Image (cartoon, grey):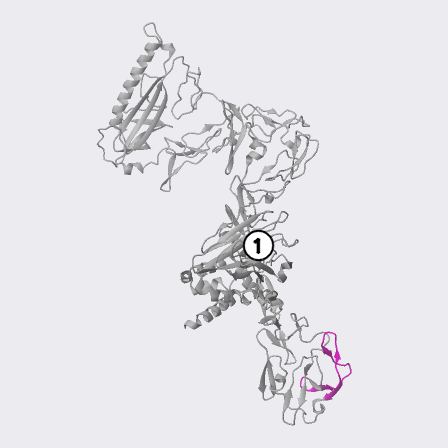
Amino acid sequence: MNCMNKNHGCTHICRETPRGGIACECRPGFHLTKNQRDCKLTCNYGNGGCQHTCDDTDQGPKCGCHIKFALHSDGKTCIGRLGPCAVPTRFRFERVLLVDSDKLLLDWQASNIFTHNFMWKYSGERSVQQQASPQQLPNGTSQLPAERSTHRSGDAGNPRLGNRPETCAVNNGGCDSTCHDAVTGVRCSCPVGFTLQPDRKTCKDIDECRLNNGGCDHVCRNTVGSFECSCKKGYKLLTNERTCQDIDECSFDRACDHSCVNSAGSFECLCHKGYVLYGLTHCGDINECSINKGGCKFSCLNTLGSYECTCPPGHKLHWNKKDCIESDSSYTVSCGIPILNSKASQKQNNTQSCIETLAPPVKQKASFKIKDAKCHLHPKLKGRQDDGGRHLGAGGALPCNDCHVTFVNLKCASSKKVKGRRARNPPNKEVTRITLELEAEVKPEEITASCNLNCLRQRMEKQVKSSIKALKKSINQERFLIRVAGLEYEVAQKLARASERQENCGPGKERDNGRCVRCLPGSYYHGEQEKCISCPPGTFQEREGQLACDLCPGSDGHGPAGARNITSCTGQCPSGYHSHDGFKPCQACPRGTYQPDLGRTLCFPCGGGLSTKNEAASSFHDCETKVQCSPGHYYNTTVHRCIRCPLSTYQPDFRQNYCISCPGNTTTDFDGATTVSQCKNQQCGGELGEYTGYIESPNYPGNYPANVECTWNINPPPKRKILIVVPEIFLPSEDECGDVLVMRKNSSPSSITTYETCQTYERPIAFTARSRKLWINFKSNEANSARGFQIPYVTYDEDYEQLVEDIVRDGRLYASENHQEILKDKKLIKTLFDVLAHPQNYFKYTTRESNEMLPRSFIKLLSSKVSSFLRPYK
């Protein structure tokens, strides 16, 4: 026996049991009948198909109707009691049989079905009597003959009836609803939501939506005896059940990968620079290197959120960060530059002076220890005396008055470790060391007959050593200073000078509202003024906390004040032009080449022998290709035809010679993709949390990829059950279950199944798992794609199993649109699940907070269930 043989006669689902047997199962909302094969509909599934009320019976759902409505012959639809074939509504029909002179027997029948003598009255004054057989209509109802005779009520065929006053004991006094006996006769009244008609008998439903839209902000839907307000998409109904409030989607967990901007009825996800949006809410790194190598001259290296151009050995990156230029031996340091033997001339920092030398410089390195001090470059207080201290730096006395010092490198470091075996410092005491590197130039023009080049060098080494000895003495006497940007600084500061340290923030910083802040890009720290100043025109500064601004390159050297980037400097070559340094004077790109960027040193060839109509072309569009490629294709300059973009790439524009790589770890379902939205993340599945979590289709809320399979496992802690809410699910319905979501005990097809669907359902449903563990599998075929699903779940204490199942199986949970929206509200579901998973969290919410979160009808439903559940313990 197996399910392959015509599904073994099962109406819905056939399962093979572990012992080789066969078991039929039904989908949610259906119950297995006694024959163990057929599935009968219950009121839990679509209200049993009933338009108004539904009651479960042994034969299936039994439909009923509200007041003033009768059940249609289809057994589901409700229609007005007076159909098109009935007598006009101004008449009230009743059938009365005379028993004796004092008693009347009332025998109700449908208002348009008559089989005996009858009397029918109008306003208690006139009566129409007729004895005839009714005409049977095809739908089983009856219609009166056209001929009628009218009599006074006293002549109604029986003199004993006469004009006796009406009473509620007879036919409810003719009232549609409530009847009250009064001295003058009967008085009819109607329930809330209905109004008494002019005949003072009939009740008519009030259409509350006709007056001021029922007080609803958005949509008003009239119901029998009442009405319902609902909101447009992106809004939620407040607990007063009238007002609509915008849903702040940005407050949801995982709303957007990077940043979220809420708007009325909607929201928008934004990505950081270097990232692109896909799947509606996700951000993926842009592979700029896939777009014509990022515009790099040599090679491109993609990084998260950015990219880098690289150069071959012997070259360095141009200031435009894309071109490569030959490397030179110049160095840029804060105080001077080292002298290199390989070059006869060196360019000094921020100056145009040259230092010519034929002899190697004199180099000296020394290390000094400072007690009870920390490395801190701190401005020298104005009140302190110089005391003839030693100075280092441009604009001040050099450490060697007779030396030609060209390079100074100063390094300060604090450590708790002390070199030497005789160190006696406490283990937690820091020791500061200053390492000084000096280079002194030996000038050939100073050679004399009595002192050659070696003599000069020995003399210079002696002077440098003597100066370092003097520096060490100055450091011990705390008279060692350095001058940078017009201000003298102490390179190390005693710990006891805490009050003095707060008087100045140090180099590169200024005081703002009592706190120290670094100088912003586009500015530099002026030592004499002790504040940050904007870079003057013709200079720029890209970094924070700098002591100087860099000069703009180019022939004019102009630019705005406070420039933050070299691109702000004027004189850059426009697109379609190039020069040796990217600044004017510029040359037009020759025919057959193009350049889309500013400030470049080269032009890109069209390739394949293609030419351009004119010089100064700025795009590949200007190249005269043999065919024009549409989106989803790129032009191959080797074969001169359009090629479809391969998998994991896309191209949204016409006439391009490249395809863009999909962001992050996404890929496309097919080749020839035209938008980034066709790039989809295939990651899914895994072991889920023990208490709460989500089952989410890959790439949600974007469309899931084709031909994907995901598997999740929920393994709750002991003595806990699983509750699942499916707010909505979108699966394509044009094929026969190509994409399927199934939840069962384990991966075995014969295991107990809790839920299985291959269709789209926008109506929410909640259900409990039929097994303690859940194995969840989603599979799509090679052709389908849709939005998918995001299904929350919670595990709860098994002591509450009866209560939870009683709630989720109650049709009232889904009957109201407002209740359905609660099951779709991510915040409310998260709150309810939090309480269900951890009941002690119930006390975090006050009664007022609960009333503000949930409508009264929903609270009433839950309260009745909880009270019924707890009643045995009261």
Residue 118 in picture, x, y percent from top left: 70, 86
**Could one spot residue 458 in this view of the protein?**
yes
User: What's the residue at 23%, 33% (across, down)?
Assistant: 425
Measured as percent of width and height from the top left, residue 807 is found at: 51, 66
- Residue at 30% in and 28% down: 434
Circle 1 SS class:
strand
Q: Quadrant of the C terminus?
A: bottom left
Left or right: residue 405 versus residue 859 is left
Percent from the top left, x then y, of residue 391? 31, 24
In the rendered view of the protein, which quadrant contains the N terminus? Answer: bottom right
Question: In the rendered image, is residue 381 in sight?
Answer: no
Which residue in the rendered view is the most extreme toward the top?
449
In the image, residue 72 sits, relative to residue 485, either above or below, namely below
**Relative to residue 747, is residue 396 depicted above or below?**
above
* Closer to us: 792 or 529: 792
Please identify the quarter of the rendering in which residue 122 is found: bottom right
Rendering coords of residue 658 (x, y %): 62, 34
Start and end of the magenta stretch?
Answer: 122-151
Q: Quadrant of residue 46?
A: bottom right
Q: How many marks?
A: 1
Relative horizontal placement of residue 95, taking residue 404 as reference (left or right)? right
Q: Is residue 834 above or below residue 136?
A: above
* Quarter of the figure with residue 63: bottom right
Task: Report the residue marked by disc 1.
Answer: 741
Is residue 126 on the magenta stretch?
yes
Lateral position of residue 746 relative to residue 401, left or right: right
Any magenta on residue 595?
no
Q: Residues within 10 Å of mark 1 (few under 14, many from 20)?
A: many
Amino acid under disc 1: Leu
At 47% from the left edge and 71% from the top edge, which residue is drawn? 868
Viewer-closest of 641 and 709: 709
Taking 169 as reference, is 799 above or below it?
Answer: above
